[in-house]
Image (tube, rainbow, N blue to C red):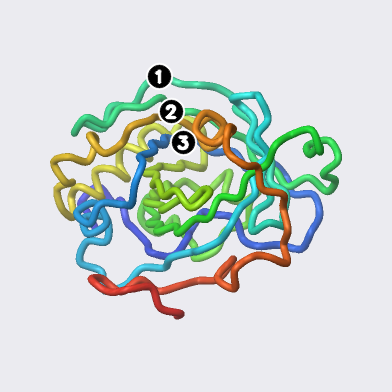
Amino acid sequence: MGSDGFGSGDAMRGSEVERAPGPVPVFDTSELRWFAIGPVPDDVLGWFLGERESLTVEERADVYHLHAVDGLGVKFRGGTMLEVKQLQSVGDPVDLGNGLTAPLTRWSKSRPAEDTAWTSVDVASVEVSKRIVKRSFGPEDSLPPHIEMPAARLTPGCNVEVTSVWVDAIESWTFAFEAYGPLSMRHSLVIDAWAALIGDASPPSGLARHLDVTAAYPVWLRQTQEVRLAVTPNPESRSALNGSTMSLQVGGTLTPS
């Protein structure tokens, strides 16, 4: 624990808890995100893991609908659960140093009860497989182990993720911050999460050079994948890993926890 009272957790704190189908109140976040082509570099993953012997890793396949709107993200989480993200605002760039600068974007996320307003046979879709390694940071004692989406609007914290992404067998990766809680705190939550990360160990010198694009998933997918074959959601074809929790052993391989 640092002297600033900013703690970390390896559970997916502040992220959504799986729920039964039905409407969910809006979950509001502020985010930074970068993408790069290729696998996660070993030095980046090693730095992010730090001294931990294992971290919780989620593997799943999401199906995105490629709407021609930069500020709209529509996906079926795990191929079955509809989630809609809408851009609310684009803030000033956040400079983390080390060559990492990106605008802090504010998003609202919901799980509508009906999908007819968001999906159409005329909109291309693409399956995105993900392996998500996530750490969570927040003011001391503010991070309960599980937070329902509405409550997370009031509980301050910041998730940081390094995620491997596969689309049509092409591998990329993304580095992202997701701050939640009172809007006035989110910029400082991102800065404090980054300070906690680099307080554990200095980032690789070439981290920023790996990260080619600053964008959210909707823009990145449309720009890089819309010319490829669209994939229609088919829950029956999903891998047995979808929605599972894995344990990533440092220096080893993914094994079921």
Residue 104 circle label: 2
* Mark 2 vs 1, N-terminal side: 1
Q: If the image is split into quadrants, where does the C terminus sit?
A: bottom left
Q: Where 8 sits versus 182, above or below?
A: below
Q: Amino acid at mark 2?
A: Leu
Q: CA distance from mark 2 to mark 1?
A: 6 Å
Q: Amino acid at mark 1?
A: Asp
Observer-nearest residue: 237 or 49?
237
Q: CA distance from mark 3 to mark 2?
A: 5 Å
Residue wearing tag 1: 92
Q: Amino acid at mark 3?
A: Glu
Q: Are marks 3 and 2 in contact (CB under 8 Å)?
A: yes
Q: Position of residue 124 (x, y in %)?
A: 70, 37
Q: Are marks 2 and 1 in contact (CB under 8 Å)?
A: yes
Residue for point 41% across, 35% down? 32
32 left or right, relative to 208: right
